Each structure stands twice: as structure tokens, then as C-alpha cells.
Image (spheres, helix red, strand yellow):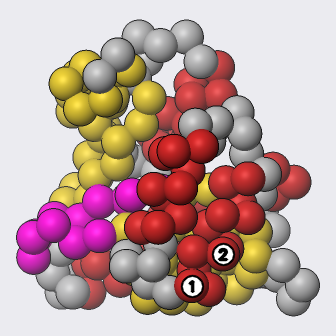
Amino acid sequence: MNDVAAFQISKITGSAELAGITAGLIGALPSWFGIPQVNAEYVESANRLSGLVARTDTESIGVLLYQRHFAEAAEIHLMAVAPSWHRRGVGRALVDELVSELTLDGCRLLQVKTLGATHPDRGYARTRAFYRSVEFFPLEETNDLWPGTPCLIMVKPLARPT
């Protein structure tokens, strides 16, 4: 089911507002965001990173934080969608909006890091499947970025602006 008409996406540059939205959404997803110290780091990062927020008339239902590492490369730092909105087009719409923005600005490559497939977490299997569905490809799985936890780096080539 796709409910894209039921929400709007807006850009917010690092702020207390974005941090509050991020905190609320990751708090609603303890299976994905269950480490308090890491959650605090994500919330803090929302004070300085750019973000996209999906909203209905009454609530924030999705957030995507991202950063530009180079003119040609960017990274999704975090994405969280309210559980009641999973599989309804919010994540896809957030990624599509980011891709449009980055492509217009000349960016050529988008990456995301997620829990690697060598970890048996079923929720993250769905996360990896989602990223595959929006044309991210696995590049490398490593244990060097998150000690003791496999990190899968996925990449999405972006079109050249016309």
C-alpha cells in the first residue's frame, strides 16, 4: 500500500526541531535503535546534519538524516519511519526526494551503512531488502567500522544531472 498523498516531505537543516523528531521516531523503533548511547549520538547529529522529514497533518512519520562527504558523494546517516507507516511508501519517498536533491546538485554516489547479513537480525534483513528495492547495491561487509558488529556498506549510483 502506498500512501504518498497522505504526507508531505520537507527539508530541515540541523536543528533542535530535527533532533526532537529524530528522538521521537527512533524511540518508537527499539528493535532497530536499541542502544541508548548510539541513539543519543543520532539525536545529537540531527543538530548539525541536513534532514528530510515526512509529515502528515498531525505528526512526523519519517526522518532521513544525511551528509555530503564530497561534491560527488553523500551518505544516508539515519532513516527512521514510524512503525504504523512501514510499507506505505514513506521510506521510498524520503530516498527519492534525497536522490532528486543530490542529483540536481551534481552528486554522483549515495551510500548507506546497515547491519550486515552475517548477523541474524530479521528486522535488518527487511532493512537490507528495502535498500535493495530502492536500487542500493551491497559494496562491502566489514567488522572494522563497528567492532563486533558486521557493517554492510551499500551504494546507489546517481544519474548525471541533465
| Mark 1 vs 2: CB contact within 8 A | yes
Main SS of residues in magenta = strand
Q: Residues within 10 Å of mark 1 (few under 14, many from 20)?
A: some
* Count of numbered marks: 2
Q: Position of residue 15 (x, y in %)?
A: 50, 87
- Amino acid on which disc 2 is placed: Gly
**Region in magenta:** 67-78
Q: Residue 23: image x %, image y %? A: 66, 64
Place residue 147 in its image quadrant.
Answer: top left
Q: Residue at x 84, y 79 (%)?
A: 59
| Residue at the spot of label 1 | 16
The residue that appears at 26% across and 87% down in the rendered structure is 104
Residue at the image position 73 percent from the left and 53 percent from the top = 27
Q: Mark 2: give few (<14), some (14-19) or many (20+) Cα within 10 Å.
A: some
Instruction: Tell me the residue that label 2 is attached to.
Output: 20
Q: Secondary structure at mark 1?
A: helix
